[in-house]
Image (spheres, helix red, strand yellow):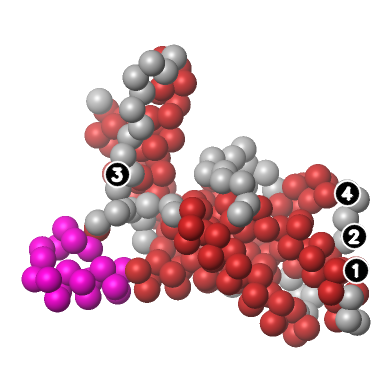
């Protein structure tokens, strides 16, 4: 299973690829795979599986489900890559598949929770079960570290209450460091739409974090 990483320093996907200098470039790997070199696909997985897993984990907040989603993403990539066109950079195409897999999972989960709630005759709170994160116990933790842990937990709990689309855009921009243009390519929308959704996401986060900030 890829190493768990929830929080990360924002970093442009293009810059991040410099860490894999010994690996062949994406276009070379894709061409090689289309010609029957299956080790080329393994190299693509090596380059991107950790980042795909991290994005899934930030979206769904579940290690096991994130691992399964990562496998689902690369299975779809394997099946579709022969039809990949170079209109967009490979990593934006990959992230589009990743985002869609996560959103589909979250919507399925929401429908399941609503179905369980209705069949059990529960109240509206049942649909929100599991969406809140507990703030970690900071006993015996240095003060600064405890504050950072608490802030991180509160922030990720707030992000988890955003709609699927707003959640994905705030993660792509504020946590993973994508540019407006990269996000537009990933989501298949205009730069203006990205800015509009990001504004709504930030405003919603301000509302969700108001009590914590003003405490």
On-image quarter of the N terminus: bottom right
C-alpha span from label 3 to label 2: 44 Å
C-alpha span from label 2 to label 1: 6 Å
User: Vertically, is 5 above or below 85?
Assistant: above
Range of magenta residues: 110-127
> Which residue does the numbered mark 3 point to in the structure image?
208
Q: Residue at x 43, y 35 (%)?
A: 152
> Which residue does the numbered mark 4 point to in the structure image?
21
Q: How many marks?
A: 4
* Residue 97 location, quadrant: bottom right
Q: Residue at x 77, y 47 (%)?
A: 15
Indicate which label's residue lies in the foreground, 3 or 2.
2
C-alpha span from label 4 to label 3: 41 Å
> Which label belongs to residue 24?
2
Left or right: where 9 falls relative to 18: left
Residue 116 magenta: yes
* Residue 98 location, quadrant: bottom right
First in sequence, mark 4 or 3: give its number: 4
First in sequence, mark 1 or 4: give its number: 4
> Which label belongs to residue 28?
1
C-alpha span from label 2 to label 4: 8 Å
């Amino acid at each position: 299973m890829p190493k768990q990483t929830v929080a990360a320093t924002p970093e442009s996907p293009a810059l991040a690829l410099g860490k894999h200098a010994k690996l062949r470039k994406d276009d070379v790997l894709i061409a090689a795979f289309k010609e029957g070199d299956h080790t080329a696909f393994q190299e693509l997985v090596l380059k991107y599986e950790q980042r795909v897993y991290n994005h899934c984990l930030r979206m769904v907040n579940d290690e096991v489900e994130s691992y399964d989603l990562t496998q689902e993403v690369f299975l779809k990539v394997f099946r579709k890559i022969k039809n990949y066109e170079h209109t967009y950079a490979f990593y934006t195409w990959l992230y589009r598949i990743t985002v869609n897999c996560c959103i589909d999972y979250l919507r399925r989960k929401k429908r399941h929770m609503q179905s369980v709630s209705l069949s059990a005759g529960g109240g509206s709170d049942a649909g929100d079960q599991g969406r809140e994160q507990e703030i970690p116990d900071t006993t015996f933790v240095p003060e600064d570290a405890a504050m950072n842990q608490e802030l991180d937990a509160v922030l990720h709990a707030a992000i988890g209450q955003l709609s699927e689309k707003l959640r994905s855009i705030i993660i792509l921009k504020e946590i993973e460091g994508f540019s407006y243009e990269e996000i537009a390519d990933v989501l298949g929308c205009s730069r203006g739409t990205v800015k509009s959704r990001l504004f709504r996401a930030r405003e919603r986060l301000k509302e969700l974090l108001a009590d914590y900030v003003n405490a």
